[in-house]
Amino acid sequence: MSMSTVTGSETANRQNLQNNRDSKLYRGRAPIASMDAMEDMDGMDILTGSNPTMQPDCHMLGKGVIPGLRYRHLGKSGLKVSNIGLGSLKAFSSEDCEMNEDLVTLAFENGINFFDISEPFTSKRAEVELGRIIKKKGWSRRQFVVCTKVYWDKTEEKALSRKEIIESVKDSLKNLQLEYIDLLIVHKNDPNCPLEEVLRAMSYLINTGQILYWGTAKWSPVEIFETFSMARSHHCIAPLAEYAEYHPFHREKVELYMAELYNKIGTGLITWSPISLGLCSGKQEDQATLFTKLALKSGKYAKGGMDMLNLHDGRGPHEATLRVKQLETIAERLGASLTQLVLAWSLRNNTSQCVIVSASSMEQLCMLFNSLQLLPKLTNTIMDEMDKILTNKPVRPPMVSTLQQRWAATGGMPPQ
């Protein structure tokens, strides 16, 4: 073998090694903040505002898994959660103890490992029932994740404080009969409570083993980022995830800001909607009514003199009703209900690591779980068709410099 051949081979090997190193560095470096660039490179999970999905391990949970169920790390943590979680609103807060147990057991045995206390007025009942079921079943503590909330705005004092947070955790641990809570959510920010007080209370609870992670609900992106920055400067533990509403008629916060917060500071996302929480029955008319109300509430469809109290009074169909009917047509074409279509639409967004669902019956819960099987059918073509129907895809406002604003009176030119 000649010397030139050896040299050429070594050069090629070095080039290949450098290319491999570059590709790894590309995946690990600071993600692109532009959402447009993320959409263009949709094939890479790191650019969709979330982490790669993991195939479920059948031996990991219960007896089996629902087809299409996946597990994700919540935020940039090591905690793995199923992409569907079971919420308490309808599932395990009722007076029917047997039905509560059946619903929780059905979810667990089909791979659901995330259980959420979803509603303030029945939170105590839900915690007691969930704790009773877990204790009765004897499930390993490694197999499930429990999320509960600090509903400070529903207390008599209506004030968030270190005392309120710690007392709330004590009550929840007693109700759940658990040694610790996996994820504690602060429901709404209190402008009268210093962020440092919240951070130090959460850091104390985590350091003493009473909770593992904490998060926020109904906090603005600015508040979340400010909390993260203060946590870094005060050497406290930052929130892991935001708990946010997300459905086709409520998109701005999740699609414009949460993916960027994940990429910049590692904030995870848990989503819910009135549809996923089982607030309508399986009847087509009830589903259409709820969807129309959500469309009207969004304020995006204000033509035709809409009246939320008279959706079916014989007058001509208005814009919101027409759009809901067009979505129903797509659902029928895919062989699914409108509820299943919208839940699958939410699940398809990789920005969210977990979507909370709830149901008051086994049939309704199975119907929601079957939404996972719709995911392969939601192609880019179908998603584009839905966006054309909705006409509400959020877009970032163009950046305008302060100089341009100052010179607006002179047509964007500097004053002479």
Image (cartoon, rainbow, N blue to C red):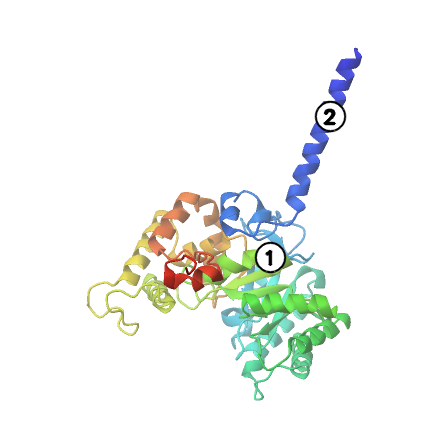
Image coordinates for residue 298, horizontal then vertical, percent: 38, 66
Q: How many marks?
A: 2
The residue positioned 41% from the left and 54% from the top of the image is 341
**Can you tell which mark lies on residue 262?**
1
Is 157 placed above or below 377 here? Answer: below
Dot 2 alpha-carbon crowd within 10 angstroms: few under 14, some 14 to 19, many 20 or more = few
Regarding residue 246, the answer to whether it shows in the image is no
From this viewpoint, is residue 110 visible? yes
- Point out the residue furthest to the front here: 416
Q: Position of residue 168 (x, y in %)?
A: 65, 80
Location of residue 45 with respect to 6 vertically, above or below: below
User: Which amino acid lies under the numbered mark 2 shown in the image of this protein?
Assistant: Asn
At 19% across and 68% down in the image, what residue appears? 314
Q: Which residue is mark 2?
A: 13
Q: Please state which of residues 19 and 44 is positioned toward the viewer in this rendering.
A: 19
Q: Quadrant of the C terminus?
A: bottom left
Pick whichever, 397 or 409, lies toward us: 409
Q: Amino acid at mark 1?
A: Tyr
Instruction: Provide the secondary structure element on which disc 1 rests.
Output: helix
From the top left corner, tell me how far across and down residue 163 is, in percent: 68, 83
Element at label 2? helix
Q: Residue at x 68, y 58 (%)?
A: 77
Residue 319 horizontal side relative to residue 86, left or right: left
* Residue at far top of view: 1
Tell me where residue 209 appears, x and y as whole percent: 76, 71
The answer to whether 96 appears left or right of 177 in the picture is: left
3D distance between C-alphas at marks 1 and 2: 36 Å
Query: In the displayed structure, does residue 198 sit left or right of residue 272?
Result: right
Viewer-nearest residue: 366 or 398: 398
Of labels 1 and 2, earlier in sequence is 2
Q: Quadrant of residue 5?
A: top right
